[in-house]
Image (cartoon, grey):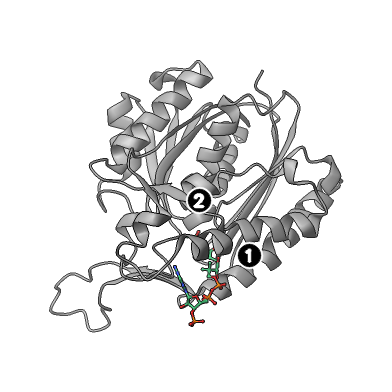
């Protein structure tokens, strides 16, 4: 499997740390030093469908393919605009594609999970081209009175068109199920028979637990992945890590003993956009001409679940 095109889309409203101080007991200094985030984009009148369609259309254009060439659509989202129909079905209709599609929820690791599934479809011959779209509206899941979570997240969508080829080398996906460290519960409905229904709860995160999980598992996953491929950390040209926290990026980089130039980052202006994070970063770097054909990329993400997803791929685009 190769990545043959990328795209992304962001809401227009830019929310900076200063604005957050007008309704939260927080400061630009606290947020910047703890996370590296200065601003993030947040949905106002946009929808995930609108952003997903824009990202998907740009990825198709970048790949030189048309919607009719897509054999499957995989969308990654923690929560789409509608619980049903899936975002993938609405994107299929909006783009004018003639194929099946389904949503997956791997939380922040969703892009790597979707790439891996796309690779399985393509490498098994069941599909020739798969469109992956990650679209997230974390601002709709957060409690905007909880300063420990809402300052961390942003919204956006990223997409990749995957096609046949040898670029996708290997992946390592893990889950360590835990319903306490990070969760969000939807409206339970009103069934008079549901005796175990739990009430709605906005995004809850035990920040320090997630931090410890990330700095211990991400380097371990990457090292295991590289070892399995007979490669060393020095041989990777670009490490694209889930943009959750600048301190986590620095801790992983230090552990792998690599220079900062190998860890491109947009966390300062995007915040944590869950599964869209890596897809947006990949697109921004692709469009900035950051990659050369033959470069080795290592992608790694972690998130609620808890999940991790890491993969190695050769950049095959000109
Ligand atoms: N502004 C000011 N003070 C704050 C804020 C805020 N926005 N948020 C919390 N504080 C306070 C706390 O109340 C606490 O005060 P206290 O000492 O008086 O109790 C103090 O700051 C320290 O709080 P901690 O939670 O210990 O702060 P920490 O240094 O751990 O940083 C953070 C918190 C940034 C959340 C960190 O734990 C982290 O980055 N964790 C990883 C989070 C992450 O990556 N999540 C995403 C993964 S999953 C996904 O991507 C969907």
Is residue 255 shown left or right of residue 109?
right
| Residue beneath the point at 15% across and 74% down | 191
Q: Which-is-in-front pick, marks 1 and 2?
A: 1
Q: Tell whether label 2 touches label 1 (CB within 8 Å).
A: no
User: Under 8 Å from ligand 1: the CB of mark 1?
Assistant: yes
Going 61% across and 56% down the picture, which residue do you hit? 246
Residue 303 tag number: none
Residue matched to label 1: 214
Could you say whether the residue bearing mark 1 is in a helix, strand or loop?
helix
Nearer to the camera, 50 or 255: 255
Residue 314 placement, left or right of 78: right
In which quarter of the view is residue 35 placed? bottom right
Identify the residue at image location x=30%, y=39%.
Answer: 49
The residue under label 2 is: 110
- Left or right: where 167 falls relative to 182: right
Report which quarter residue 163 is drawn in. Answer: top right
Task: Find residue 273 and report its horizontal and vertical position in percent.
Answer: 45, 50
Quadrant (top left, top right, bottom left, bottom right) of the N terminus? top right
In the structure shown, which secondary structural element does the residue marked by tag 2 occupy?
helix
Mark count: 2
Alpha carbon separation for disc pair 1 and 2? 15 Å
């Amino acid at each position: 499997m190769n990545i043959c095109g990328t795209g992304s889309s962001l809401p227009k409203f830019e929310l900076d740390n200063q604005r957050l101080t007008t309704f939260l007991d927080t400061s630009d200094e606290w947020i910047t030093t703890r996370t590296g985030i200065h601003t993030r984009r947040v949905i106002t009148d946009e929808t995930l469908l609108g952003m997903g369609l824009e990202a998907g259309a740009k990825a198709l254009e970048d790949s030189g393919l048309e919607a009719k060439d897509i054999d499957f659509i995989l969308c990654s989202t923690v929560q789409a605009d509608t619980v049903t129909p899936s975002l993938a079905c609405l994107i299929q209709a909006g783009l004018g594609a003639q194929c099946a599609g389904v949503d997956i929820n791997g939380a922040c690791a969703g892009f790597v999970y979707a790439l891996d599934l796309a690779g399985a479809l393509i490498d098994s011959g069941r599909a020739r081209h798969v469109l992956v779209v990650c679209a997230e509206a974390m601002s709709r899941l957060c409690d905007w009175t909880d300063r420990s979570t809402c300052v961390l997240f942003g919204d956006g969508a990223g997409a990749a068109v995957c096609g046949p080829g040898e670029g996708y080398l290997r992946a390592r996906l893990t889950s360590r199920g835990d319903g306490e460290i990070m969760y969000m519960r939807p409206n339970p409905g009103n069934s008079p028979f549901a005796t175990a229904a739990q009430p709605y709860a906005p995004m809850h995160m035990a920040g320090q637990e997630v931090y410890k999980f990330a700095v211990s598992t991400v380097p371990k996953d990457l090292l295991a992945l590289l070892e399995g491929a007979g490669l060393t950390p020095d041989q990777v040209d670009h490490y694209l890590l889930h943009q959750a926290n600048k301190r986590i990026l620095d801790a992983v980089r230090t552990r792998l003993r690599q220079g900062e130039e190998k860890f491109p980052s947009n966390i300062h202006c995007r915040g944590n956009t869950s599964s869209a994070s890596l897809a947006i970063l990949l697109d921004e770097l692709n469009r900035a001409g950051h990659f050369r054909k033959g470069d080795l990329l290592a992608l790694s993400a972690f998130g609620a679940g808890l999940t991790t997803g890491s993969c190695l791929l050769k950049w095959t685009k000109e």
